[in-house]
C-alpha cells in the first residue's frame, strides 16, 4: 500500500497538490529512497507546509523533526493531523515564520528543502545557512529551468564565464496571497515578491561551493514504471522539476 493512502488526511489538509499519485510518487523519491539516511536523525524541514514530509520522516524513524513554516494555519493543520495519527508531540517542533529569521545557529543531521528553493532569490544564503547546521545530507526538491531553456552542464572551470554560462536563475514575481506560491517577505511589493527558478547546473554549482556532492533522482525511470502518474506530476515528467541529493562526509 502506498504511503499516503495509509494516512489519507493529508489529501485534505492543503490545497497545494494533494493528489495521491503525486504525494506517493514524491514519497518514493524523498523518503523511501533515503530511509537509511533519515532513521535516528535530527531533521530540519524547511517550509514544512501541512507537515506531510515532517510526518513521513518521523514514520521513517527520524529521532526529531523541526519544521519552519510561515503560514500558521498550515502548522495548525499539521498538529491536528499528527494528533489524529498518534504522533507524540515531543518528536517534533514547528516554528511559524521566515526560515532566514529562524535558522541561525541550530544543528541538524539532515535538511529537507522541498518546494521552497524556487520560492526565494536567496539561494546561496540559504545553502550557506544549511551548511552551517552541520547537515551531511540535504534533499532539495525544486522547480528548475527546463532542459530546452538551459545552457546545459558546466563545461568550464572559468569562474567568470560570461557566454553560455549554465549556472542561471530565472527571476520571477509571485503573488503572496496564494498558498502555492511564496509567502510575504521583506521583498514584497504590491502583493508580489521576487523569486528565482534555478537551472540544474546552478543547484549543483552552489552545492559544490558549500562542500556537497550532488546526485539526482531518476524520474525518467520512475515514469517508465509508473506512466499513469505523469498526469499529476507533469513538472517532474516534463523536466522542469528535480530532486537533488546533497551529501558530504
Image (spheres, grey):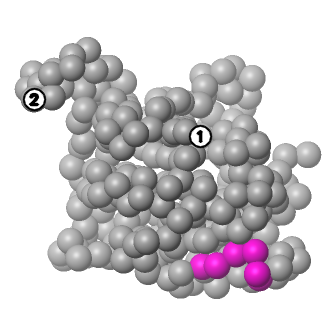
Count all numbered tags in the image, as a single digit: 2
Write down the region rendered in magenta: 89-94
| Location of residue 226 in the rendering, given as x and y in whole percent from the top left corner | 73, 28
Say whether residue 159 is left or right of residue 115: left
Q: Which mark is residue 160?
A: 2
- Picture quadrant where residue 74 is located: bottom right
- Picture quadrant where residue 154 is located: top left
Which residue is identified by label 1?
A: 233
Say whether residue 104 is left or right of residue 22: left
Quick one: label 2 or label 1, which is nearer the N terminus? Answer: 2
| Location of residue 48 in the rendering, given as x and y in whole percent from the top left corner | 57, 67
Crowdedness near tag 2: few (<14), some (14–19) or many (≥20) residues, C-alpha within 10 Å: few
Residue at image point 15% right, 22% down: 158
Residue at image point 66% right, 68% down: 65
Q: Is residue 228 visible?
A: yes
| Location of residue 95 in the rendering, given as x and y in whole percent from the top left corner | 53, 81
Residue at image point 57% right, 84% down: 73
Direction right: furthest residue: 1
Q: Give the structural element (helix, strand or loop) at label 2.
A: loop
Disc 2 to disc 1, C-alpha distance:
36 Å
- Above or below, 227 against 91 in this view is above
Amino acid at each position: 500500500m502506498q504511503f499516503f493512502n495509509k494516512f489519507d488526511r493529508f489529501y485534505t489538509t492543503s490545497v497545494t497538490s494533494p493528489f495521491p499519485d503525486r504525494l506517493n510518487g514524491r514519497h518514493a523519491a524523498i523518503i523511501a529512497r533515503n530511509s537509511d539516511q533519515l532513521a535516528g536523525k535530527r531533521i530540519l524541514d524547511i517550509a514544512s507546509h501541512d507537515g506531510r514530509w515532517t510526518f513521513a520522516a518521523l514514520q521513517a524513524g527520524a529521532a526529531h523533526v523541526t519544521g519552519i513554516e510561515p503560514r500558521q494555519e498550515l502548522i495548525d493543520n499539521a498538529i491536528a493531523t499528527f494528533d489524529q495519527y498518534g504522533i507524540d508531540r515531543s518528536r517534533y517542533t514547528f516554528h511559524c515564520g521566515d526560515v532566514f529569521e529562524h535558522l541561525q545557529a541550530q544543528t541538524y543531521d539532515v535538511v529537507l528543502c522541498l518546494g521552497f528553493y524556487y520560492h526565494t532569490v536567496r539561494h546561496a544564503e540559504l545553502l550557506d545557512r544549511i551548511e552551517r547546521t552541520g547537515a551531511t545530507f540535504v534533499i532539495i526538491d525544486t522547480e528548475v529551468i527546463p532542459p530546452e531553456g538551459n545552457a546545459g552542464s558546466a563545461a568550464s572551470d572559468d569562474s567568470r564565464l560570461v557566454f553560455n554560462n549554465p549556472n542561471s536563475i530565472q527571476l520571477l514575481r509571485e503573488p503572496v496571497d496564494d498558498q502555492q506560491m511564496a509567502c510575504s517577505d521583506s521583498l514584497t511589493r504590491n502583493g508580489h515578491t521576487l523569486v528565482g527558478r534555478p537551472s540544474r547546473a546552478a543547484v549543483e554549482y552552489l552545492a559544490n561551493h558549500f562542500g556537497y556532492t550532488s546526485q539526482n533522482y531518476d524520474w525518467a525511470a520512475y515514469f517508465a514504471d509508473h506512466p499513469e502518474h505523469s498526469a499529476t506530476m507533469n513538472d517532474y515528467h516534463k523536466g522542469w522539476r528535480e530532486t537533488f541529493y546533497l551529501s558530504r562526509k
